[in-house]
Amino acid sequence: EKKVVLITGCSSGIGLSLAVRLASDPDKTFKVYATMRNLAKKERLIECVKSLHKDTLDILQMDVTSWQSILDARDRVVEKRVDILVCNAGVGLMGPLEVQSLDSMRQILEVNLFGTIQTIQAFLPGMKARGQGHILVTGSTGGLQGLPFNEVYCASKFAIEGACESLAILLQHFNIHVSLVECGPVNTDFLVNLQKAELGDTSLQQVDDLTLNLYEKYLQHCGSVFQNAAQDTEDIVKVFLEAIQSPSPAFRYFTSGDVPPLTKLKATEPGGSRYISALSKTMFSSEEQ
Ligand code: NAD
């Protein structure tokens, strides 16, 4: 019997690559429901799976911010069960905190936090009733350590950590595993899709010069990190596969293979000052790289 997998946010990036990989599994182990908010964007996914038999992939509309849309997608799962749920949909928000509107902050939390939680809520009762399941969530380094100009994004990803860790404790009693796949920078549409304050934006005119100067440095740093150190989605998919195939999956996986040094520093110095100054130096010192 195939394992039924449902993935959110499959029109691009990590979700798309994971859907393609699982649906093209040589042993046809998986039946994949690749879901996306906007079905008009399904061409890319279809292009990647052209030669596949229809029995391993189905594409469904699902907007994680709409409970009705989640329920409709759940109803279309012909097996009437999901063995592996991958909560992957997410968006970024970047810029000085004082220019972020309440609406844009809410939108990030709607997708990243409530979207993830609502998706889990929809599939949890079925998993509990069957006494098995695996919930995987695309986590971020920004969920483990603060990053300047990403306050609200980090808040949403930190919140996911808390929600997942809390759930994992309970779900042990139901033979349901929870795994976070913690990603650093990955080559996807993430930077294109995120809401970002651009240096010329009129909204930034009210912001003080020091903040703008540091924001410019941050953007340069970010650009070079994505150019030089970003992982490809295939690397991320390998880690998802490891977690999916493990008989006793870990709670956290680090796609870089190890805990990032600055995350380690944060853990070893709970007072936090060393992390804060180390990060500031990494991002803002002009001698960087
Ligand atoms: P991406 O922008 O290519 O993919 C994100 C997907 O989520 C998109 O397909 C988008 O359409 C979808 N999405 C957005 N709002 C949605 C909604 N309301 N309902 C359903 N889908 C929605 O970027 P990605 O890098 O593949 O992002 C996937 C996940 O990885 C996100 O949760 C992101 O926070 C996380 N992540 C990415 C990076 C990175 O550097 N790219 C790093 C760490 C974590």
Image (cartoon, rainbow, N blue to C red):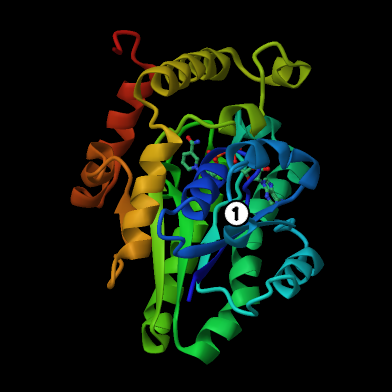
**Residue visible at 61% across and 17% down in the picture:** 208
**Residue visible at 24% across and 51% down in the picture:** 267
**Residue visible at 74% across and 39% down in the picture:** 41
Res 121 → quadrant: bottom right
State left or right for residue 17 relative to residue 75.
left
Q: Residue 112 at what x, y percent from top left? A: 61, 52
State left or right for residue 101 relative to residue 95.
right
Q: Residue 218 at what x, y percent from top left? A: 47, 20
Above or below: residue 247 compared with residue 34: below
Q: Amino acid at mark 1?
A: His
Q: Nearer the viewer, residue 116 or 81?
A: 81
Q: Nearer the viewer, residue 273 or 287?
A: 287
Furthest residue toward top:
287
Q: Residues within 10 Å of mark 1 (few under 14, many from 20)?
A: few
Q: Residue 223 at what x, y percent from top left? A: 47, 18
**Residue visible at 44% across and 54% down in the picture:** 25
